[in-house]
């Protein structure tokens, strides 16, 4: 599409406007990346403080019964459970970039349990939950809204929580239905 637009601008005589838009867009992109990086660094720091203070361990203890039911194929005390809980914690606070390494480690640990070339039910469930947009505080979206001078950048939190609840419950329900059909 970009190439077609440039070719059209050359024939239409609007190449100067295209160049202007390209440089303006590049400048805006750099500004946005810098502002997003600062928010990401802030929240990663907050997660580190929460980890050091034991808040994440407390959150993990609180969530452990629910996560145990979601992943019955993972033995108690297995490292995969810790990585899953860390991934979910980071995702809940809108830190998808910070959640990714934990998600990869969780999948690697679940792969060790399955000892198969095929994805286990736990691996599929984990992927489904991550895909369902598990977020309570959308920090990246809030940062973008702040960067563009939104009057109320955090007003999307309530709708995000509602959307997370609906998508997560739907995803888990469909996953369980599909698991039953795979077993039959």
Image (cartoon, rainbow, N blue to C red):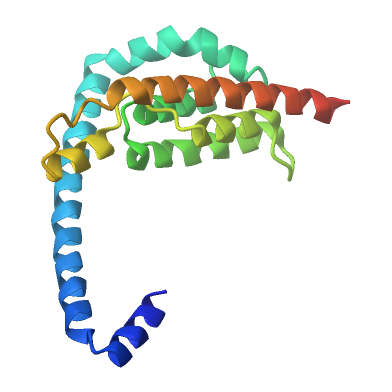
Position above or below: 170 against 151? above
Q: Is residue 8 left or right of residue 176?
A: left
- Numbered-mark total: 0
Horizontal placement of 130 versus 5: left or right? right
Image position, residue 119 (x, y; %): 69, 39
119, 75: nearer the viewer: 119
Q: Where 122 falls versus 64 (above or below)? A: below
Quadrant of residue 160 within the rendered picture: top left
Drawn side of residue 86 relative to residue 12, left or right: right
Rendered location of residue 162, percent (x, y): 41, 20
- Give coordinates of residue 62: x percent, y percent: 41, 7
Q: Which of the image's four quarters has the C terminus?
A: top right
Is residue 45 or residue 129 the one in the foreground? 129
Seen as rendered, the residue at the extreme right is 184
Pick out the residue farthest to the bottom.
11
**Residue 112 visible:** yes
Q: Is residue 143 left or right of residue 156?
A: left
Q: Residue at x 18, y 52 (%)?
A: 32
Residue 37, placed above or below residue 16? above
Q: Residue at x 28, y 27 (%)?
A: 156
Q: What residue lies at 14% left-to-right and 68% top-to-bottom?
A: 24
Q: Position of residue 70 (x, y in %)?
A: 60, 18
Residue 111, quarter of picture: top right
- Image quadrant holding the N terminus, namely bottom left
Q: Residue at x 27, y 38 (%)?
A: 141
Image: 68 above or below 111:
above
Note whether residue 76 is visible. Answer: no
Could you say which is closer to the camera, residue 16 or residue 52?
16
Residue 12, quarter of the rendered image: bottom left
């Amino acid at each position: 599409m970009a190439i077609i637009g440039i070719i059209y601008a050359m024939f239409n005589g609007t190449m100067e406007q295209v160049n202007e838009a390209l440089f303006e867009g590049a400048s805006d992109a750099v500004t946005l990346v810098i502002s997003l990086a600062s928010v990401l660094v802030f929240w990663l720091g907050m997660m580190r403080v929460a980890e050091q203070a034991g808040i994440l361990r407390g959150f993990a203890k609180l969530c452990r019964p629910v996560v145990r039911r979601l992943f019955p194929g993972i033995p108690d005390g297995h490292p995969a459970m810790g990585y899953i809980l860390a991934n979910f914690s980071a995702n809940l606070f809108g830190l998808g970039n910070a959640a990714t390494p934990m998600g990869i480690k969780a999948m690697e640990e679940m792969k060790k349990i399955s000892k198969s070339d095929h994805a286990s039910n736990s691996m599929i469930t984990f992927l489904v939950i991550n895909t369902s947009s598990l977020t309570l505080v959308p920090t990246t979206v809030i940062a973008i809204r702040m960067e563009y001078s939104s009057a109320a950048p955090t007003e999307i939190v309530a709708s995000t929580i509602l959307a997370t609840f609906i998508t997560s419950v739907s995803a888990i329900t469909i996953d369980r239905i599909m698991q039953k059909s795979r077993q039959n």
